[in-house]
Amino acid sequence: MKIDGKPHRTIWPAEGGDAVEIIDQTKLPHSFEIARLETLADAAHAIKAMLVRGAPLIGATAAYGMWLAMRADASDAGLSNAYDRLYETRPTAVNLRWALDAARRKLGPLAPEARPDAAFKLAGEICDEDVGINRAIGEAGLSVIKEIQAKKKPGETINILTHCNAGWLATVDWGTATAPMYLAHDAGIPVHVWVDETRPRNQGASLTAWELGNHGVPHTVIVDNAGGHYMQHGMVDLVITGTDRTTRAGDVCNKIGTYLKALAAYDNGVPFYVGLPSPTIDWTIADGVRDIPIEERSAKEVTEMTGRLPSGEVATVAITPETSPAANPAFDVTPARLVTGLLTERGCAEASEEGLLKLFPEMRQAGED
Ligand SMILES: CSC[C@@H](O)[C@@H](O)C(=O)COP(=O)(O)O
């Protein structure tokens, strides 16, 4: 997508080819800063400390992390150490495992001297593939938006609610949940996006609002608890979220609070769609509530908030009594029965094992666990 009119991805090889560069998302929306990753440790830190985040971008960063690792130590031990080091950074987004497995499959059989170049090439391919997948998810979502538009009065706005940031900042480009919004907006369809702030880290307020604003998409930031109210008043036409891991049965794990949005949507007859790139499907599990590992993050993310003071300085303040403990599960699982459709690069799938297998028949054997 564009920043100040210039096309940008979220991750790219640095000029000169000696590092990888990323947008440091911990600094947005207050400042736009680029960070350089030169080592395996830099890549692992970028994922763990959430300089990069969002399932597809975590996978892409891990792939480049394997390249950075292979430049320093391309031995079998180096490969296995890099895999383990990156794998332990964040537990929920399955794209991390997907990218690391792809790297290990590709690099394992090669001689150590051939591994750095092969790892670099693979990381580039994973990034390009992600861009193509998200663009295709956008087309699938655009069809859904057009169907909703057809039932409205000419010129009437289509209100879409989204949670967290499943935008281009969470991927290499386009985003999953946002790709349909960008395509609809660019096609002249009047869309307006309700952006959940997404406590505790505020990815909606800080990142989704920033990127929609940059692209000129009309949007309004709302507190996480407002969505149900707007649905009851007919002010939400559809919900589109992302996912960090979707089981083969169509259970969707996404940012904490997504489940409550799905319940409210179900109660109000509002369609609930999920942008789902195929690397985010975990074919090895069916029951998301039982089997998806949910990241528990620092209580400080709940007890503190960071923002810009009138002076322009960015500061962190405490918002709870000093003695109150806090809990911080970062994701929840929305059961497939609450999901209207999964927007994939191969079209819209019903949220069920059969629905997914219809679009991905080559995975028919993969799910026997
Ligand atoms: C296309 S990104 C999908 C998900 O990764 C996104 O919705 C999300 O929950 C991100 O969580 P985060 O903790 O910011 O990495």
Image: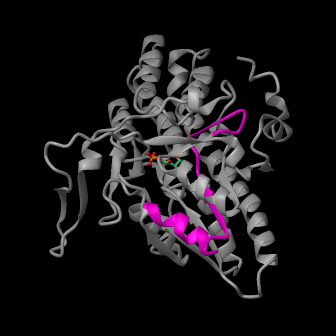
The stretch in magenta equals: 224-251
Picture coordinates of residue 220, whole percent (x, y): 48, 75
Picture coordinates of residue 190, whole percent (x, y): 66, 81
Residue at the image point whose x is 60% and y is 68% from the top: 231
Quadrant of res 82: top left
Picture coordinates of residue 266, whole percent (x, y): 67, 56
The answer to whether 368 appears left or right of 55 in the picture is right
Q: Is residue 352 above or below residue 318?
A: above
Is residue 74 among what the camera can see?
Answer: no
Is residue 180 among what the camera can see?
Answer: yes
Point out the image quarter for the C terminus: top right
Quadrant of res 145: bottom right
Residue at the image point whose x is 75% and y is 23% from the top: 366
Pick whichever, 91 or 68, lies toward us.
91
Point out the image quarter for the N terminus: bottom right
Q: How many marks?
A: 0
